[in-house]
Image (cartoon, helix red, strand yellow):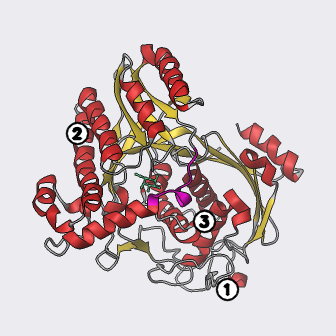
Amino acid sequence: MKDTMLAYFKEIFEDIKDVEVYFAPGRVNLIGEHTDYNGGHVFPCALTIGTYAAVRMRQDRSLRFYSLNFKEKGVIISSLDELIYHREDDWANYPKGVLWAFAHHSASDSAPDTDYKGEGGSGDKGSCDKGSCDKGTCDKGSGDNGFGDNDFSDKGSGDKGSGDKVHNYNTSCFMPKYGMDIVYWGNIPNSSGLSSSASIEVLTAYIIKDMYYPDISLKDISLLCQYAENKFIGVNCGIMDQFAIAMGKKDHAIFLNTSNLSYEYAPVRLAGSRLVIACSNKKRGLGDSKYNERRSECEEALRRLQNVKPVNSLGELSEEEFEQYKHVIGDETLIRRAKHAVYENGRTVRAVKALNNGDITAFGRLMVESHESLRDDYEVTGIELDTLVESALKQEGVTGARMTGAGFGGCTVNIVEETHIESFIKEVGKTYKEKIGYNADFYVVDIGDGPVKL
Ligand code: GLA
C-alpha cells in the first residue's frame, strides 16, 4: 500500500522526495451505542480497513489536500494561517479542523471550551505566535508540550447538563510551523457509520504527532480530534470513535468507560465466527442527522432527573434507580431516550463479561436487545437497518446482529459462523434488495491496530 500511495502522490504533486505514508483504521462498535455522551460504557474495536495518507511537509504555510475518494473536488488549498470552516472544502474540513484544534489549544492554558464561530465569524486561530513555533518548540515557556502525561482534568458536566465530561488538558504551543501536501485514500465506505471521518481526523493528528510532537499520547490525540469534531465541524459526538481509532489493538475490542476514560482491552474470540458488516448504503452525515437532537434529549432528561437524584450522567444510574425515578422526567419520549442510555450501559457491561467468559451466545443476545432498544426507544434505526437485522437473524449460523454507529442509515454488525458467511451475504442481500430497492454491501472484517507509519 505504501508504494501505491507514493505513486498516487507523485501523480498529484509530481515527486515523492521526503514523502511519508501513514495509516489509521476505521472502527466498528460491538455494543454500547449512544452511551458515550451519556457517561456510559462502549465496546468498539478498530478495523484493518481505514484511511491512508501520503504526506510531505512544505517550506511555507500552505496546505494542499487531495482525496482519491473525492477526486471531483480536486486539490483543496488552505493555509495554517486561515483555518476556517468552508462548506465547499467538504471533506478537507476534517484535517483542517484537526490543525485548527492543535493551534486552538495553544490559545489558552485553561479549558478550551469556546465554540468555533464558523465561516466568516470570529474563529479564534489561536494565540500562537507563528514565528515562534519551530518544530514543536514554543517560546511560551516550559518546553513541556503538555500532552505527554495525559494531563487532562475532568471539568465535570454539571453546568452543561451533559454526561460527556470535557476531558481537558493543558497545552502550550502545538501549531506546526510548516504546511503540507497530503493525499488521502480510504477503503472504509463513506458515511456508513464506520467512522471514516474520525479516521481522517486521527490520521492527520497522528501525522502531526509523528512529525512534530512525539510525546503526545494517543489518548490525547483522540481528545484533540473529538474537540475538532465538536467545535470546528459542529457535531457534538462523544469520544468513542476517535478513541477506538487512536487506541485500537489487533484482535481486541476496547471496553471504555467514557466518564473517566479508563479502559481495558478484551480479546474478541468468536469461536469459528467472524464479524460481518452489512452496509445499508443509505447515506447519512452526522451533521444533518438527528444526532445532536438525541443528545439534547438525553441532556434534558438528565436535568429533570437531577431534581431528585444527584447524578452527573445517565450512565451513573442503575436500571433499578432509573425505574424508581423516571416519572420525574415527565415526558414519554424523553423517558424512552433516557431508558435506552441507562439500559444500554448495563447491557454493555454484561456483554463484555459474557465475551470474557467465552459466552458468545449471551453476547449475541445482548446485541439483539441493543438493536431493539435503538429501534423502539431511541428511534435511530429506520427501515434499512431493521431489514438488515431482521433478515440476518433468520439466517443460520448468526449469533448476533445490530446496527452500529450513530444510526439513521449506515451499517449493521453481525456475528456469523464462518461456514455460513456466503449464504448469509446472499440471502440478506437478496431480502434487502427486494424490500429496499437497492443493494447492501457486505464486508467480512478483522480487528486491527491503531494508527501507524508505514
Ligand atoms: C457516532 C458518534 C459517537 C457515538 C455514536 C453512537 O459514531 O461519533 O460518539 O455517539 O455515534 O454510539
Whether residue 82 is visible to the viewer of this picture, yes or no, is yes
Choose the circle earlier in sequence order: 2 or 3.
3
Q: Which mark is residue 129?
A: 1
Q: Nearer the viewer, residue 345 or 3?
A: 345
Residue type, mark 2 in image: Lys
Give yes or no for residue 289 being in the magenta stretch: yes
Secondary structure under badge 2?
helix
Residue beneath disc 2: 353
Residue 89 x/y as whole percent:
73, 63
Classify 176 as above or below 259: below
Of the 4 image quadrants, the one containing the C terminus is top right
Residue beneath disc 3: 98
Q: CA distance from mark 2 to mark 3?
A: 36 Å
Residue at image position (54%, 28%) is: 442
Residue type, mark 3 in image: Val
Q: Verify CB contact (< 8 Å) between mark 3 and mark 1.
A: no
Label 2: how many Cα within 10 Å (few below 14, some 14–19, many 20+): some
Q: Which mark is residue 160?
A: none
Q: CA distance from mark 1 to mark 2?
A: 50 Å
Q: Nearer the viewer, residue 346 or 296?
A: 296
Residue at image position (54%, 77%) is: 105
Residues drawn in magenta: 283-291
In the displayed structure, does residue 342 sit left or right of residue 290?
left
* Count of residue discs: 3
| Circle 1 or circle 2, nearest the eye | 2
